[in-house]
Every structure is written in C-alpha cells, then in structure tokens.
Image (tube, rainbow, N blue to C red):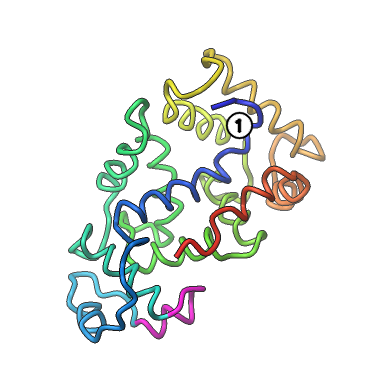
Amino acid sequence: MNLEGLEMIAVLVVVVLFVKVMEQFGLLEASYDDSVEDELELSAVRHRPEGLEQLEALTRFNRKELQILYRGFKNECPSGVVNEDTFKDIYSQFFPQGDASKYAHFLFNAFDTNKDGSVSFEDFVMGLSILLRGSVQEKLNWAFNLYDINKDGYITKEEMLDIMKAIYDMMGKCTYPLVKDDTPRQHVELFFQKMDKNKDGVVTIDEFIDCCQNDENIMRSMQLFENVI
C-alpha cells in the first residue's frame, strides 16, 4: 500500500472493512426470503431491536435487506449486541500482519452512539446505512466523528495522530515504503496544512468537509461501495 495521501485513509477504511465484515457474516450471499420467522426473532434476542418497519424508516435499507443483515448479525451475535472485544476480534482477522485493536477501538466508539459499551443491531445498520447509502455530507460527518475522539466538535493534532498511529499499526507490513517512526506525525502535519484553513490549530467539521469534497480521490472512493447488498 502506498502511503501517499494516507492522512485521509480513515474516511475510506471504514467502508472497506464493513464490506469485509458483511462478507464474513455471509450477508452478501444470503437469500431474500421474506420470512415471518425473522420478525419473531427480532423480539427474541436478549437486546430487543426496533421493528423492521421502524428501522426501514430510519435507514436506507428496505425490509428484505434488513432481514438479510439481521440474519447475519444474529448468527455472529446471538445476544443482539457486539462488545468491544468481539469487535476487535472481527477486525483482527483482516489485518493479521498488524495490530488492529486500537483502530477497532476508535471505530467501535464511532458506532456506539449511545456510549453504553456495546453496538446493537440498530447501531450497526444505522452506521452501515450512512457508510454505504448516505450522502457525501453524511459520510463525511460520520468520518469526522471518528476523528473527533473526545467529541468536542474539533479535530486536534493529537487526535489525528492517535488515529494515524492506529492505522499504521493496523496495516503493519503492508505499507510501502516501510514506515519510519516519524511518518505518522509527518502525515498529521500535512493534514493540518490542507484542512486548518484559519491556522488555529484545530479542524472544524466545515473545514474537514470542505477539504474532502475538493479532493477527487476521496470523492471517487466514496462511491465504490454503494449498493453492495
């Protein structure tokens, strides 16, 4: 993997990883049978998700797509929720050459919208709906939230450095050229040169979105994984 432009990779990695997670769950191969059993099982798990009708209204998935997603989710997570350790285990499968635990931690926090230490089926499909079917602005808002670790509405250099180090740790030996110790910090400096328009040391959501929308590579990449189910 070439490191050019890696300061923006977290905008894209989340989508790639969730396509792989869906494949792991068998979601891309499931049938579209409209089964009453799925309706009943939605209320049988320990954590009771919202009904299909409500989830259909809250996401960009139709009823049959939600049934497919739920079948895969319940097979991997019978309790109806995913904890952080399970989340890390899932992502470590795709990056055995590196350490994905830190990046998975940040990604888990981005999906755990109510901060209860677990990702429910609703959390999963609502996040997935944005990543796969959301508008460009919605996807970038989601990515900004990932970078904004302390959720104060700004991205600092320290937050960006934490994310970048996590990405490098996750990629491990797959980077080319090989990563030097100061490479993550160099990329963070480049990031702020591009995005911190008023040079106040933090990046606002408006600065983030404006910069991403003017980057052709990011915009093109964000269209690659739409409508995979």
Q: What residue did someone put label 1 on?
A: 6
Note whether 166 is above or below 134 in the view shown: above
- Residue 167 appears at what percent x and percent y? 48, 32
Residue 88 within the segment the image draws in magenta: no
- Residue 180 appears at what percent x and percent y? 54, 13
Note whether 3 is above or below 125 in the view shown: above
Note whether 138 is above or below 187 in the view shown: below
Q: Residues within 10 Å of mark 1 (few under 14, many from 20)?
A: some
- Of residues 117 and 163, which is closer to you in this image? 163
Question: Residue 118 occupies which quadrant of the picture?
Answer: bottom left
- How many numbered circles does the render carry? 1
- Residue 221 appears at what percent x and percent y? 62, 48
- Of residues 143 and 204, which is closer to you in this image? 143
* Residue drawn at point x = 38 percent, y = 41 percent: 104
Is 195 positioned to the left or the right of 64 in the image? right
Secondary structure category for the residue under label 1: helix
Three-letter code for the amino acid on which mark 1 is drawn: Leu
- Of residues 54 and 152, which is closer to you in this image? 54
The C terminus, quarter of image: bottom left
Is 9 positioned to the left or the right of 217 in the image? left
Is 117 positioned to the left or the right of 212 in the image? left
Note whether 126 is above or below 145 in the view shown: below
Q: Which residues are magenta?
A: 52-62
| Majority secondary structure of magenta residues | helix
The N terminus, quarter of image: top right
